Image (tube, rainbow, N blue to C red):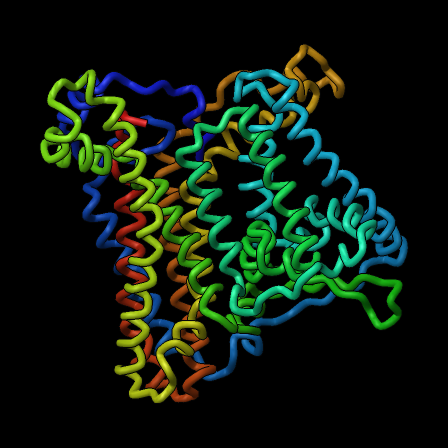
Amino acid sequence: MPYLRMSQLATLPLLAWSSLLISSNSYGHSFGQTYTLPVPLSLYLYGAAAAVAVSFIIFAYFLGSESAEQATPRLGTPLPPKLSTSLRFAKPWLKAFSLFMLFLCIASGFLGNRNPYGNFNMTFFWVIFVLAYAYSSAILGNSYRWLNPWRILSTLILPVFPRGQHGCIRYPSRLNYWPAILLYMGFIWIELFGQATPLSLSQYLLAYTALNLIAAGLFGIDSWYKYGEFFSVLFSLLAKMRIISRQNSKKESQIVVTIHSPLKALNESTPKNLSILIFILCMLASTAFDGLHESQLWVRSFWVELNPYLQPYVGKNPFSAYPKLRILYLIYQTSWLLLLPALYYTTYYSFIRLSKYMASSNIPTRQLSLHFAYSLLPIVLAYHLSHYYPLLQTQGIKIISLASDPFGVGANLFGTAGWFRAPIIPNIETVWHAQLGLIVGGHIVSVYIAHQQAMALFGSKRQAMLSQIPMLVLMIAFTVLGLWILSLPMGNVN
């Protein structure tokens, strides 16, 4: 996340290169601190791989042929009429609050404190909205459908113009979710390399607001916010893992809240086109890249391993070559950021093709790849949580004090400006083992979902098990890769 890099300055090349020559054993990386693992990393990797493999054996031999939806109970609870009425009454106020928070984030960046740790918009956007709200969507469902501040703004402004609400042209079906993919990858680039400050964040938000208004006016509000606005796509995918659903009762005056397994929403549909699968793989690849690109191993790959081959173009004097190398390093990192989703897709598609061969299936490989796409979502969530949840603990809590003084001018609107000012340093051992549990648990859930999807698709227990052997290998590889990336020591060049 860029929040951890706001106050870091570019180090001199000699200091950076010399620091990379320091050898190390197994470390966990979080907040730039090193932590020596209590047992060798290889034991963690073997143990994690064994846990995923054993879970596959249990699922393959002990699960019946019933679907995941049939196997998991649902508990529907009608809310009291007064509470249902209150929630309906609160909905427009929550929409107004969502729009207000967008305006507040933009205004505080332009007018507020320039210190990223003391400005409201940095903590609220990067930690509360991008992280905490995303995780809540995976539990409570996709409230972003009606809380999306850009959609709310569009519905207020565009109907004033002729055809503004329905768009000037029909959204091209061949585009599918590709605009959202491009915007998502642009967002990740800004997150990793944009060196966001409170001011630049407000500029980005203002530009994104203008983009959404123009695109919604061109293609129509419904079409753009379904296919193009990437937060809508992101939160809708995470919401497929929700455990709580809400619908109106037959009386229409009562709201029924249903608690169910996350498997229900994951198995009730499959992607209809390739772009959704690509979006999921971009989520997976970008999170892995975020952890990898700050490691010493990654930094060495450019500043030490590739540097001799670049000297004929940039010169041998490190001080005069450094500005050129910084530009080349950005190009190098950007290229890998864009290339990694393609590598993930190639790997995933190859294993799906192998699954088809193992199951002796006549189903097209493309259809199989889409059928199992949602089984990757628990891995996506596990990767995201394992990389970023410490930010909620260290910086997210500070939103309480920042809310009383959003512009950093010494105000104390709610009497909380002095709360949680002291730095919060989490226990690194706890962080590492929590990350370990999240990675392994996410992959076990994915193995279970993929097995259930195979049972629903093939019908035969034997054929389903054979088809999932290549997927098991892929899940184990993802598990080992994820833990290995988390264990890498941090680099120093940023």
Which of the 4 quarters of the picture holds residue 109? top right
Question: In this view of the protein, can residue 147 be seen by the observer?
Answer: yes
Q: Is residue 451 above or below residue 136?
A: below
Residue under the image location 33 percent in, 58 percent down: 342
Residue under the image location 43 percent in, 54 percent down: 380
Q: Nearer the viewer, residue 147 or 175?
A: 175
Q: Nearer the viewer, residue 358 or 82?
A: 358
Instruction: Name the spot of residue 313 as percent of width and height, x first.
Output: 15, 30
Residue under the image location 68 percent in, 18 percent down: 405
Instruction: Name the spot of residue 475 as percent of width and height, x first.
Output: 32, 62
Q: Is residue 492 left or right of residue 283?
A: left
Q: Is residue 176 left or right of residue 29?
A: right
Instruction: Name the spot of residue 80 as percent of width and height, x first.
Output: 85, 57
Question: In this view of the protein, can residue 37 be seen by the observer?
Answer: no
Q: Nearer the viewer, residue 31 or 297?
A: 297
Q: Nearer the viewer, residue 250 or 194?
A: 194
Q: Quadrant of the N terminus?
A: top left
Q: Is residue 350 above or below residue 381?
A: below
Residue under the image location 28 percent in, 70 percent down: 351
Q: Is residue 374 above or below residue 337?
A: below
Instruction: Name the spot of residue 83 as percent of width and height, x first.
Output: 85, 52
Q: Is residue 389 left or right of residue 19?
A: right
Which of the 4 quarters of the picture holds residue 455? bottom left
Q: Is residue 479 above or below residue 116?
A: below
